[in-house]
């Protein structure tokens, strides 16, 4: 590879968002792009999370691209290995391999205001790009709590997203810290192997049965022979979840019936009233993500499992001390403590024209126009950006909506100016910069709608909220609403930046033109 290569588009990350962006670029006739991936293979969070029992809590036929249906999902809720294999097939089917640059972790992206381009430093060399599409995802950087004395622990310590498959848990005393979506899959998967499992539960979760089943050969054959049946199945799954949205966003009181279902689910497996009390949440269901499992509660009821209804506060050698003062001796600690969601680490590596990082601009809370564009960072877009998360449906729906927006964004750049040549020079280069007023207006509308939602009124503290208690993660509406909001780029929401003379060495002039 040359020391410096210029491309029209640089995509960061090769999970669902990055691969989806790459497919969309090719379908738009754009082949001058690279996908910069820090690891050695595609898959994103479905590559990194390989812990025992790892699976999706969204039905398989909905948790896949609409343009790449898979009639051969083996289960209604597929495991990590099947989802990762699906992403590898998408990569091959759409000819994405030539665009992939593995082991290319982005260290810094800097906006060159004179040339109207992004200069990108990676561990595999440098690139420049007219447009950057950041698809690093909110579940990419594990979050480890700062526990006093953890460095003195003599045993094994790892995060669920960095599972050590070389470490044998059989016969060990294991502590699992956290009770989120990964913990409820890990606990039943390792409970039978370990001598003792201690679950440190700061806050209990609402858990509903997981209606999972194998998809038989005959059923898969029908989907292969009659593709419309796969599309129909996806449509039904989508419609059901769209109908549920109002209970989360406008009428949280309607979720009381679902709470009763969750309590019955618990009562069937947990006979000990003291343990049931520990596991019963005191907040409205849906405030935190509703978890799906038919094996979590049965595992917690086993004699080799202990639930500590308190968070971990200190480590003294091999002794773990909980906030309630109880002490537990363990051989291994598994942190299932989530990710950096409201403080995305990639933001620290994005530097705008004034020398400020995106993290500094977002220090008061993340916000982006239509979940994609941040003011002051021209031609930089994010997939799964602020307030694009979902509490009850498939993120692939939101990703595809953002891909529509990305495609129109690039079309607008084509209309407004002639794209530069292969070296990054020539043509009448153009950039779009989201107007601060447009970002504020969009964010205000989102936050006003958020006030009524269960995520803000349900009485819990969740990973959806940032340090100031503001929900910068979830979209407070249906996926259909978001699809309409991101169908087209409204140029009135952007300032147009032009390079009057882009020839090297001439000193290009930038002019902001009212859109």
Image (spheres, rainbow, N blue to C red):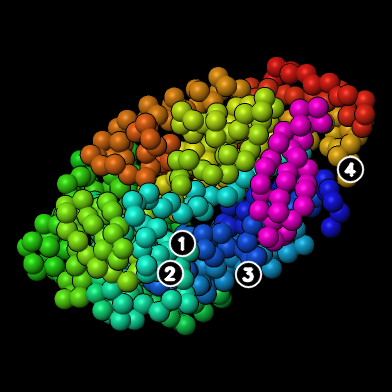
- Residue at image location 49% in from the left, 34% down from the top: 366
Residue annotated with mark 1: 161
Report whether 93 appears left or right of 453: right
Of 341 and 403, the residue lying toward us: 341
Residue annotated with mark 2: 51
- Check if residue 124 falls in the magenta segment: yes
Of 359 and 27, the residue lying toward us: 359
Question: Main SS type for the magenta part?
Answer: strand
Residue annotated with mark 3: 89
What's the magenta region?
100-129
Quarter placement of the N terminus = bottom right
CB under 8 Å between discs 1 and 2: yes
Of 393 and 19, the residue lying toward us: 19
* Disc 1 residue crowd, few under 14, some 14–19, many 20+, Cα 10 Å: many
Indicate which disc, 2 or 3, sits on the residue closer to the N terminus: 2
- Check if residue 103 falls in the magenta segment: yes
Mark 2 secondary-structure assignment = loop
Q: Find the distance from the CA under tag 1 to the CA under tag 4.
A: 39 Å
Q: Find the distance from the CA under tag 3 to the CA under tag 1.
A: 23 Å
* Disc 2 residue crowd, few under 14, some 14–19, many 20+, Cα 10 Å: many
């Amino acid at each position: 590879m040359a020391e410096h290569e210029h491309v029209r588009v640089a995509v960061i990350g090769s999970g669902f968002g990055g691969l989806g962006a790459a497919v969309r670029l090719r379908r738009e006739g754009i082949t001058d792009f690279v996908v910069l991936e820090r690891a050695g293979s595609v898959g994103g969070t479905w590559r990194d999370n390989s812990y025992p029992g790892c699976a999706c809590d969204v039905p398989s036929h909905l948790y896949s691209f609409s343009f790449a249906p898979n009639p051969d999902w083996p289960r209604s809720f597929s495991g990590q290995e099947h989802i990762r294999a699906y992403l590898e097939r998408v990569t091959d089917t759409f000819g994405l391999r030539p665009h992939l640059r593995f082991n290319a972790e982005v260290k810094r992206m800097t906006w060159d205001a004179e040339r109207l381009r992004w200069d990108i430093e990676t561990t595999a060399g440098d690139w420049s790009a007219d447009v950057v599409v950041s698809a690093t995802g909110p579940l990419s950087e594990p979050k480890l709590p700062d526990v006093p004395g953890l460095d003195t622990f003599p045993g094994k310590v790892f995060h669920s997203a960095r599972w050590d498959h070389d470490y044998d848990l059989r016969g060990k005393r294991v502590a699992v810290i956290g009770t989120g979506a990964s913990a409820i899959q890990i606990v039943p998967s390792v409970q039978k192997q370990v001598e003792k499992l201690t679950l440190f539960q700061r806050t209990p979760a609402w858990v509903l049965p997981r209606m999972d089943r194998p998809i038989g050969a005959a059923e898969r054959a029908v989907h292969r022979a009659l593709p419309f049946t796969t599309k129909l199945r996806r449509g039904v799954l989508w419609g059901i979840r769209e109908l549920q949205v109002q209970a989360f966003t406008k009428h949280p009181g309607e979720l009381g019936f679902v709470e009763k279902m969750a309590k019955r689910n618990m009562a069937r497996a947990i006979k000990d009233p003291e343990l049931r009390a520990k596991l019963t949440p005191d907040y409205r269901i849906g405030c935190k993500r509703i978890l799906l499992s038919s094996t979590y509660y049965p595992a917690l009821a086993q004699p080799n499992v202990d639930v500590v209804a308190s968070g971990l506060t200190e480590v003294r050698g091999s002794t773990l001390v909980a906030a309630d003062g109880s002490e537990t001796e363990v051989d291994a600690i598994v942190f299932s403590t989530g990710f950096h969601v409201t403080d995305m680490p990639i933001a620290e590596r994005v530097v705008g024209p004034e020398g400020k990082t995106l993290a500094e601009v977002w220090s008061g809370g993340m916000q982006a126009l239509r979940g994609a564009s941040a003011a002051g960072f021209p031609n930089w877009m994010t997939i799964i950006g602020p307030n694009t998360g979902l509490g009850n449906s498939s993120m692939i729906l939101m990703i595809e909506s953002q891909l529509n927006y990305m495609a129109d964004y690039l079309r607008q750049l084509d209309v407004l100016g002639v794209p530069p040549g292969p070296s990054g020079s020539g043509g009448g280069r153009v950039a779009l910069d989201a107007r601060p007023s447009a970002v504020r207006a969009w964010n205000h509308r989102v936050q006003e709608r958020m006030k009524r939602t269960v995520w803000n009124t349900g009485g819990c503290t969740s990973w959806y909220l940032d340090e100031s208690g503001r929900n910068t993660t979830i979209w407070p509406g249906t996926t259909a609403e978001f699809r309409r909001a991101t169908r087209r780029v409204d140029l009135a929401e952007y300032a147009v930046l032009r390079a009057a003379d882009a020839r090297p060495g001439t000193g290009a002039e930038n002019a902001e033109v009212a859109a």
